[in-house]
Image: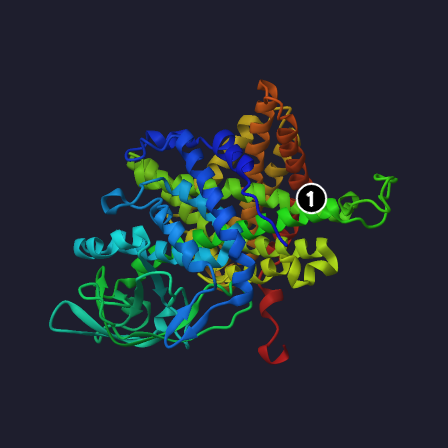
Amino acid sequence: MPTYKAPLENIKFVLHDVLDTEQLSKLPGYEDATLELIEQITEEGAKICEQVLFPINQSGDEEGCVLENNIVRTPKGFKEAYDVFAEGGWCGLSGDPDYGGMGMPVLVNTVMQEMICSANMSFGMYPGLSQGAYEALHTMGTDEQKQTYLPKLITGEWSGTMCLTEPHCGTDLGLIKSKAIPNDDDSYNINGTKIFISAGEHDLTENIIHLVLAKLPDAPEGVKGISLFVVPKLLPEDSSANGVTCGSIEHKMGIKASSTCVINLDNAKGWLVGEAHKGLKAMFIMMNAARLGVAMQGLGIAEVAQQNAVAYAKERLQMRALDGIKEPDKPADPIIVHPDVRRMLLTGKAFTEGARALSYWVGLNLDISQKHPDKNKRKEADDLVALLTPIIKAYQTDMGSEIANMAVQVYGGHGYIQEQGVEQYVRDARIAQIYEGANGIQALDLVGRKMGQGYGRLLRRFFHPVQNFIETHQADENLQEFIFPLAKAFSKLQQATAMTAQKGMKDPNEAGAASVDYLRLLALVAMGYMWLQMAQAAHKKLERGTDGRDEFYESKIITARFFFTKMLPESDWHFKAIMAGAEPVMELKAANF
């Protein structure tokens, strides 16, 4: 049976020692968000994840969801767990206090998302989708829409969805066929079919609020003709049915306790959110919130898979250590002594700890982008978040899947068996690389939109602090073993940026062919930047005194050394692949595949 313990010590290290989290309490509206309060909330969140959500994760996977008379029944224990979760105020953790939310920083919600995804990724889909609907309505909705929907979404009495995909179109939403016909009042009749709708139907809440993309009769072709509508399952005024039904649920590879639905809209009454034909802007509000949430799924799955792999490697006895017997009183040594097992476990450790710092840095900048009194600071933070969103979504979900697979490898044949529980993490992790924009789309977004935006303004928001850190600390003896490898990788990133931008202007296939390697190169540099700061923080703690926790901080430096010597060198071959150009990818005719 798998286990999960929230990594509170590692979480506090990032919040306390790496990021300047205390600055949050100095932002308008966050005065109460002291580091002490954030710690208290995190500790309480850890309890609900460990004690309420994790125990129903494996059973939820085995049981799955069932569709009965257009109603989806979630697995045993999910309704009770959701009620505990909602009653604890967790649905409104970072919600606007004007609508009943706790008003906590986005960073606090980011921490909670990680723990939820480790404990029970399927469960996390239900409040996670509600968060996307909340963000869209809070930003784009009318005052009446906000008053109608936000308080119930915050309490968790109602949940939300994003109804974007249709049978004939996924990424290319300009092809949607769902129609919105105006009524005499300010409502519309919505007709169409949406597929792959996570949390589209379930028995956890009183009502489900669908955010639906559709086209008006006078809509122009393509994405410029998309509008967004709020379509409740039950009409708020009298709780009557609203022409929204679940046609079927998907039988999936993973996240089986999350209901993935075909939603049929048959003259369902809906209301326009934002301006007509401007739904793309509202959609990206939902998508960006969802992409950050999916990035946390990659981290969360990697963390729980890593924890179980480490525990197994310390207990499983197989063969003797290559350099001599370590456990002479036992018939064999634990497999953690073997170099290849240690390589896999250190890869998981270096990734999870580095990605945690990177994710929390994004969460912190989201708060700055929303609350800082200086508009220039808000803009700088917003640019950084825009740049890093596709990077952490793609990189962390790719690595989440890889670390889950490594966990199975550590277990060997036992990992392939359902009883041990780690094979579930492989299945659950796989979808995160696909939904909310497949990772190849994230890479295209990075090179096609983010790279050139503002003549490279977004890239400078990241390049400048990295360059400044390298220059400021290059003489620091404690950091030199890390500074120079990062400087080398950063130089390659700058060269790759110039080449991709230059060639991409002449031939878009050049940018497209480089995109995945470019995203991974940038992600590795970003991880190196975070590990550099973590190594610096660890050295400072060791110099000042650690209250008997020397081994914890020394492990940070040792893990940083592993990242810089065993993982960062991957940047070299990504650079070489980028510089090879598009021809090796594009020259083969389709008929010859």
What residue is shown at x 85% (from left), y 46% (from top)? 332
What residue is shown at x 62% (from left), y 23% (from top)? 548
The residue sitting at the left extreme is 184
What's the colour scheme? rainbow
Q: Secondary structure at mark 1?
A: helix
- Tell me the amino acid under the disc marked 1: Lys
Q: Would residue 495 be seen by someone viewing this image from the given angle?
A: no
Q: In the rendered image, which quarter is residue 159 located in?
A: bottom left
What residue is shown at x 47% (from left), y 64% (from top)? 75
Q: Position of residue 272 (x, y in %)?
A: 22, 64
Q: Is residue 171 above or below residue 336?
A: below
Q: Is residue 554 shown left or right of residue 466?
A: right
Q: In the rendered image, which quarter is residue 188 located in?
A: bottom left
Q: Is residue 192 above or below residue 273?
A: below
Q: Residue beneath label 1, please?
A: 566
From the image, which quarter does the C terminus lie in?
Answer: bottom right
Q: Is residue 546 shown left or right of residue 141?
A: right
From the image, which quarter does the N terminus lie in?
Answer: bottom right
Q: Is residue 302 above or below residue 555?
A: below
Q: Would residue 462 be seen by someone viewing this image from the given angle?
A: yes
Crowding near pointer 1: few (<14 within 10 Å), some, many (20+)? few
The residue sitting at the top extreme is 544
Q: Is residue 418 shown left or right of residue 339?
A: left
Camera-side residue: 388 or 593?
A: 388
Q: In the rendered image, which quarter is residue 237 located in?
A: bottom left
What residue is shown at x 33% (from left), y 47% (from top)? 92
Q: Is residue 414 above or below residue 321?
A: below
Q: Position of residue 14 (x, y in %)?
A: 51, 35
Q: Position of residue 564 (x, y in %)?
A: 65, 39
Q: Position of residue 108 (x, y in %)?
A: 41, 41
